Amino acid sequence: MDLYNLYRKFDKDKICLSYLGDFEDEITHNIIELSDFNIQNNNDLVKIKGRVSFLIAECFQNVVRHNVDMPGPKTGSEKFFQVNIFPDLVCLTSANPVDAETKKFITEKISQLNSLNEEQLKDLHQTLLGSGSINKKGGAGLGLIEMARKSRHPLRFFFKDIDDRSSEFFLTLEVINKKAGEPQTANHIQDIVENYYTLASRHILLLYKGDFTKESVNSINEMLQPNLLKTETIGPGKRAMLVILELIQNISKHGTSINGSKNGIFFIAFENGHYNVSSGNFIDNSNAQKIKERLGALQKLTVDEVEKQYKDVLFNEEISAAGNGSLGLLEISKLSKNKFDFSIHKIDEEISFLEINVKL
Amino acid sequence: MEKLIIPATTTTPEITFDGGRGDFKMSGRSFPENVFEFYAQVLAYIDDYARHPQPVTNIEFNLNYFNTASYKIIVKMLLSFVKIDSGKTKVSIKWICQKDDITIIEKGEELKEYIKLNFEIVYQ
């Protein structure tokens, strides 16, 4: 029930994508593409697509630039970026550790910006650009002003003290298509902060909750580039990426569609030198027993037996558009040396939730 | 025979097939959502080539990431070449991999064991 509980935390989100850890600019592009795709499919949001792409890039810059590298062991305060797409708004959150001086600067700046209207923000932006006043972090708060102007909504922020010298700075931007009316859903920053600590405590590097229909999977796969985990391109990091590709394919081919969406979740975590990869999706109760027996039988196989079955399916079974037999599951078992577990939870009379957890 | 050239994308490999010279190269990543859509023209090209192959056929794989659906397609491609080997053409395969990339090396070893062609694993 563990992963299902996590899934439920993002119940209202159409899409949630969380990214913790080391940030590289090239990842920004992948995340913008995935967000663009999901926004494109939503009539109420399509008009804000350009602003959202801009703000994702700004948020990333914010995390990369306004960050202090904490000495010593990890404190549980990681760099963090999250996109939540609701039917009527997009919510972007970044978090990163900052020192006391930056905290003071940010607090004053955002309080000032939130008190200004659109015209005043524009004037302030032009004044600062003209003055050439650039602070040591690179921007005289211009990034924040741009965020306030583009989101057209007050910036929400929160500091969680790490120690007496530093804090984790959370910044949330809400982008709303005002012509579509006031949003019915809003993400309170405290909920986001709480979710962040849930993810951080589980050492999650990447979490996606959302749709796994064919078109979405294309965008997810495009995001899942080998350098996403910023780990070695060989070894356990690579095996984790290969496992996630198979799990996504599995959900896309065999997940149950509810109201036109194949909803599911996956995450990749890294703890004590091991990757944990988990996925969860809905299945028809009529298939639950068959899936339970298939996965149960796979779990009981020895490494050699997995190897044998894998080769049998690879070389002897015909490939079909409905899926490639059980090769994907056998690959997961092979890559993890059979260190995987699963559970099936009945949700109602029609559907159940299947969780698969793989350790690498 | 005209060349088949497909540029790489973030989820599909670069394909450089030159049936006129008997050269077939595939490199990069392969995890498209639908392998059939992507590989339909690739498999069709190989079928065409198999009717009138060159005396020597050189195949080179330099893949660093692929999913099992793509792996099945690779097997299917190689089995098409097995059918014409020895009789119509002499087929050689180079499977290029980084020397410490165990996942790709293992795949090469599996293929080498099963696919009865001149199969060389080349470590970079």
Image (spheres, coloured by chain):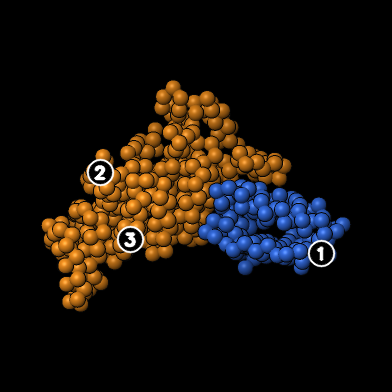
Chain colours: A orange, B blue
Percent position of residue A117, x then y: 15, 58
Task: Measure how far apart labels 1 and 2 are at the Cα level.
Answer: 66 Å
Give the residue at x 50% y 40%: A251
Query: Which circle marks residue A348 in the picture?
Result: none
Would you say A104 lies left or right of B75 here? left
Q: Which residue is mark 2?
A: A181
- Dot 3 and dot 1 residues touching (CB under 8 Å): no
Front position among marks 3 and 1: 3
| Label 3 to label 1: alpha-carbon separation | 53 Å
Residue at image location 23% in from the left, 55% down from the top = A152
Please name whichever residue, A38 or B65, is drawn nearer the observer in this view of the structure. Answer: A38
Quadrant of the snapshot with the N terminus of chain A? top left
Residue carrying label 3: A54
Q: Which quadrant of the figure has residue B3?
A: bottom right
Q: Which residue is mark 1?
A: B54
Whether residue A199 is visible to the viewer of this picture, yes or no, is no
Up/down of A255 relative to A119, above or below: above
Tag 2 subunit:
A
B64 relative to A358, above or below: below
Depth check, mark 2 against mark 3: the one in front is: 2
* Left-right relation of A59 to A356: left
Q: Does mark 2 fall on the same chain as mark 1?
A: no
